[in-house]
Image (cartoon, rainbow, N blue to C red):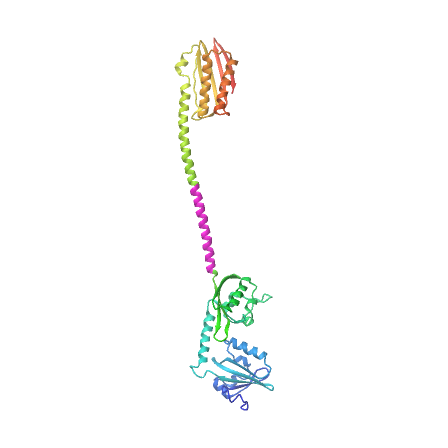
């Protein structure tokens, strides 16, 4: 193996692989540098020595291997042997049916710049991996270079057949081809804008059962310029739910305030109506008192009834309400007695006034010595009818008149 010209340059040791890249021989220098024994290495595939943390290194290795035709395959890879990690430079070359894998451990010194870079990257990876937010790194073309498990959990990308895509299936895929969510795909506009602007951009979208806030930060390198973007996806579902609840509460409060104002307006209207009703009741009460007094004043007194000879007359009136339209009267003139009994429809002041008009008209006709009952009632009817039209056309008077003289009783009546 020492006849290989590369062996003299790279002192990290060498592995000899068969055509399927399975290790079948190892140099002592390899075992010395990587603190292992030949028995622990021989028979294993070459990529089984690669650290699982170095996903990008694995991806580049298989990508370059698939494109290999001849010459030297050169890359930096993290080797994991006996629970130890080594950053090594790997040179892979094919010779006949064998592969030579020559290693150089480039982290010989603790203060090596590359080691510091590697440790910094490990710290960054640890932060990304344990973050509660979904984080993804895109290259300049929009391909997924790196992402954490939270990003997978939130986005839940699926194939066209509905199968949930895992980490390996997503690596190096175009992010904006993975979802048919129009809101999420609109983030592509921000990505394209980031190629010419170094400013962060923000977007809120609804994806599956999540409300998400996207923070898109352009990545610019001193020489290369725009190199991609970092996507930080924050789950703001709980915040949105609180905002929605607050909005509903605000709307409810507004509705309650509106109802309160309506109730206050209705209450004020009721108070106003009660005041008007109270004033109306006072007015009506005063009117009823006057009407009641008038009604009592025109009823025949007992002294008048006692003066009528040959007849015992007694009268009593009890209205159903405070004041009614009922009345009776007894008139004696020249030995003739006229008894009138009337009823005016309705109650209250109008009925009481109409009753008073009827009583006055009967007395006037009696005083004029009109004895013809037909003519008597005709004059009375025309007089009362004219007054009814002035007061209330819907009032009516029913009247009965009894004429007594010399032992004879005559009855007449009308409905006006």
Magenta stretch: includes residue 144: no
Could you tell me if residue 213 is visible in this image? no
Which is more toward the observer, 357 or 54? 357
Magenta span has 252?
yes
Report if residue 272 is visible in the image.
yes
User: Is residue 319 shown above or below 2?
Assistant: above
Q: Position of residue 165 (x, y in %)?
A: 56, 68
Residue at horizontal 49 percent and vertical 20 percent from the top:
384
Identify whether 295 is placed above or below 170.
above
Report the magenta residues as a range. 238-265
Residue 96 placement (x, y as % from top left): 60, 87
Say if 384 sits above or below 100 in the image: above
Q: Residue furthest front?
A: 196
Q: Is residue 212 left or right of residue 292?
A: right
User: What secondary structure prevails in the magenta region?
Assistant: helix
Total labels: the figure holds 0
Q: Which image quarter: residue 159?
A: bottom right
x then y, percent, for residue 95: 59, 86
User: How far across and down, in percent of the image, does residue 190 sit?
Assistant: 51, 65
| Placement of the N terminus among the 4 image quadrants | bottom right
């Amino acid at each position: 193996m020492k006849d290989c010209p590369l062996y003299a340059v790279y002192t990290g040791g060498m592995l000899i692989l068969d055509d399927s890249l399975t290790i079948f021989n190892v140099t002592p220098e390899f075992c010395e540098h990587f603190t292992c024994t030949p028995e622990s290495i021989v028979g294993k595939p070459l990529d089984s020595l690669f650290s699982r943390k170095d996903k990008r290194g694995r991806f580049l290795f298989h990508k370059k291997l698939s494109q290999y035709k001849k010459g030297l395959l050169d890359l930096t890879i993290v080797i994991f042997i006996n629970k130890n990690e080594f950053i090594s430079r790997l040179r892979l070359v094919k010779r006949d049916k064998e592969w030579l894998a020559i290693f150089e451990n480039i982290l010989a010194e603790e203060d090596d710049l590359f080691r510091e870079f590697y440790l910094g990257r490990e710290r960054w990876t640890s932060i990304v991996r344990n973050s509660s937010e979904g984080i993804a790194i895109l290259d300049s073309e929009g391909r997924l270079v790196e992402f954490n498990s939270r990003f997978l959990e939130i986005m839940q990308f699926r194939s066209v057949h509905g199968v949930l895509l895992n980490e390996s299936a997503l690596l190096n895929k175009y992010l904006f081809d993975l979802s048919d969510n129009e809101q999420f795909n609109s983030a592509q506009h921000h990505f394209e804008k980031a190629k010419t602007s170094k400013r962060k951009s923000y977007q809120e979208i609804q994806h599956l059962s999540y409300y998400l806030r996207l923070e898109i930060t352009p990545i610019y390198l001193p020489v290369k310029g725009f190199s991609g973007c970092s996507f930080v996806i924050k789950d703001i579902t709980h915040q949105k739910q609180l905002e929605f609840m607050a909005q509903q509460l605000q709307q409810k409060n507004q509705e309650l305030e509106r109802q309160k104002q309506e109730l206050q307006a209705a209450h004020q209207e009721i108070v106003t109506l009660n005041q008007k009703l109270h004033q109306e009741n006072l007015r009506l009460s005063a009117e009823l008192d006057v009407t009641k007094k008038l009604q009592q004043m025109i009823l025949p007194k007992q002294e008048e009834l006692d003066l009528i000879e040959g007849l015992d007359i007694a009268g009593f009136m009890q209205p159903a309400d405070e004041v009614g339209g009922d009345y009776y009267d007894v008139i004696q003139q020249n030995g003739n007695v006229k008894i009138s009994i009337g009823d005016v429809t309705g109650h209250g002041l109008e009925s009481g006034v109409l009753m008073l008009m009827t009583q006055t008209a009967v007395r006037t006709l009696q005083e004029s010595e009109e004895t013809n009952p037909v003519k008597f009632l005709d004059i009375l009817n025309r007089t009362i009818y004219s007054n009814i039209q002035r007061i209330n056309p819907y009032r009516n008077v029913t009247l009965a008149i009894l004429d007594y003289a010399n032992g004879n009783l005559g009855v007449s009546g009308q409905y006006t």
